[in-house]
Image (cartoon, helix red, strand yellow):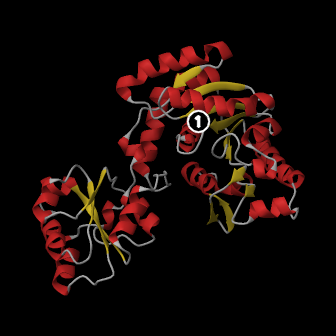
Amino acid sequence: MCRKIFVAATGQHTGKTTISLSLVHLARQKYRRVGFIKPIGPKCQEFAGIIVDKDAALMARIFGLEEDIRFMSPLVLSRGSTKEFLDGARCRQEAEETILSACRELEKKCDFLVIEGSGHGGVGSVIGLNNARIASLLGASAVMVAGGGIGSVIDSVELNLPLYQREGVDLRLLLINKLLAEKRGETLGYLSRAFAPSGLAVAGAFDYSPVLANPTLAHISRVLGQPLQGDLSQINRIVHHIQLGAASSQKVIDGLLESTLLVTTSSRDELIVTVSSLYHIPDFREKIAGLVIPGHAPISGITDQILRDSGVPFIRIPVRTAEAFSAITDHVSKISADDTEKIDLVKSSAESVLADVAARHIL
């Protein structure tokens, strides 16, 4: 018989996919056959010739589950899908059967199945299949992931909890993620007291980690839709700081922090040349993750040659500086299958932080 756990969340960007990855990793140490399914996929991509949810593709790549990908992402909601449901061109019953059929196939093959929800509890309501309904439909117990904090967590859980209670879902645990290390004990203490009357168990997941929270150069390249150039061996380098190169060259260089991505327009020849030259110095290489060079004006010939000869990683994009800077800073980093440093950190952290909690409440 296949055991199932539904990974719910109070909202986006709580670290639900990181928790799902952790649970698959931990479950593989106890069960011989472990699977993953994202019943409703709001963010899709092509994988092995079919359109699937990005998180399903991620899990397939990390854990070698490619042969099951057609079951791992049974219902993808692309642009216009919700209107099709509202217009009657597609129906909830058909969607339910699609999800149920995929889950049944995975249950035949798996001893343990991680089911990842989409966003907060109400996501999917437009087609009659919110997260709580899906957890109930698939007969899965649930764990709810919330971001760090106290008041904000209580508020968000109170908004989501009634949906799962209405559907009769066995909500086993509230996992608090992205905790501030120095406030971890205090935060968990207050939240445990807050939810004690409801009988909801509270446990801590991961502390906030810049390595997990911050993007790689490869991720930024994907966000901007432009290739990384220069030293491609640095493609998975993690960017800890993003700095706009608007001040004088000296002030910009003095303000560099660890692993800084510098955004500077294509007309700033002196700054591009300075950064390119400093990249050869080990102390500065620790600070300079790379350059994003926006702007419609071409880079001058000699500056371009110095830039390319230096090997400093850079992304050239023909938009205004403000657009490039906003695109980078407004985007929340997601783990990709190529982020080996992040994936290894998640797995090792799961073993030290989540193993005992998962053994008692989930696995």
Residue at image x 61%, y 37%? 10
Tell me the quarter of the image containing the N terminus. top right
- Residue at (68%, 54%) from the top-left corner? 41
Instruction: Please say whether residue 340 is visible from this viewpoint.
Output: yes
- Under tag 1, what secondary structure? helix
The answer to which quarter of the image holds residue 42 is bottom right
Q: Position of residue 221 (x, y in %)?
A: 41, 66
Q: Position of residue 195 (x, y in %)?
A: 61, 18
114 and 6: which one is in front? Answer: 6
Q: Give the image quarter of residue 262.
A: bottom left
Which of these two is toward me, 26 or 177?
177
The residue furthest bottom is 301
| Horizontal and vertical percent position of residue 163 | 74, 34
In front: 329, or 118? Answer: 329
Q: Is residue 105 left or right of residue 277?
A: right
In the picture of the structure, the residue carrying the numbered disc 1 is 23
> Depth check: 244 or 276 in front?
244
The answer to whether residue 176 is visible is: no
- In the image: residue 68, left or right of residue 239: right
The residue shown at (42%, 40%) is: 345
Q: Say if 230 sits above or below 128 in the image.
A: below
Residue 362, compared with residue 212, is above or below; it is: above
Q: Quadrant of residue 225?
A: bottom left
Residue 248, placed above or below residue 92? below
* Amino acid, disc 1: Leu
Q: Quadrant of the C terminus?
A: top right
Please give left or right for residue 6 compared with residue 304 in the image: right
Residue 275 lies, with reference to residue 355, above or below; the image says: below
